[in-house]
Amino acid sequence: MLNSVGIILVAAVVVFIEVPTLMEKKYKKELVVFSILLAIGVCLGIAHSFGKSIPNPIDLLTFIYKPLHDALTR
């Protein structure tokens, strides 16, 4: 529980540092992308702090390219 509060506090500090600059320069698209990526990172960090298993992106690539690799090596 304390870990998730720490993650949220760090994310809040990052928001307070970055968002005013993005708003001042009128970078709307960058602000949307920043918000989405920060939300994903916070959610994954909280899930990890509760001991949940986070899937590895390499597993998806292996699943996609393994049949192609097997077909080409035959």
Image: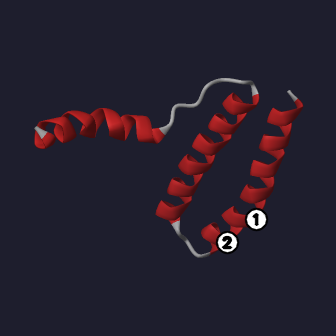
Marks 2,1: beta carbons within 8 A: yes
Q: Which residue is mark 1?
A: 17
Q: Quadrant of residue 39?
A: top right
Callout 1, which amino acid? Ile
Instruction: Give the secondary structure at mark 1.
Output: helix
Which image quadrant: the N terminus? top right
Image point 20% across, 41% down: which residue? 69
Image point 34% across, 37% down: which residue? 62
Image point 54% across, 47% down: which residue? 36
Q: Position of residue 40 (x, y in %)?
A: 58, 41
Callout 2, which amino acid? Thr
Instruction: Give the secondary structure at mark 2.
Output: helix
Q: Which residue is mark 2?
A: 21
Q: Position of residue 12 (x, y in %)?
A: 78, 50
Left or right: residue 5 compared with residue 20:
right
Query: Going by the picture, which residue comes out furthest to the right?
Result: 2
Left or right: residue 36 compared with residue 61:
right
Q: Quadrant of residue 19?
A: bottom right
Left or right: residue 52 compared with residue 36:
right
Q: Nearer the viewer, residue 25 or 58?
A: 58
Query: Going by the picture, which residue comes out furthest to the front?
Result: 74
Image point 63% across, 36% down: which residue? 44
Graded by Cα atoms within 10 Å as few (under 14), some (14 to 19) or many (20 or more), the crowding at tag 1 reads: few
Q: Nearer the viewer, residue 48 or 39?
A: 48
Query: What is the spatial separation of the Cα atoms under label 2 and label 1, in whole angstroms?
Result: 8 Å
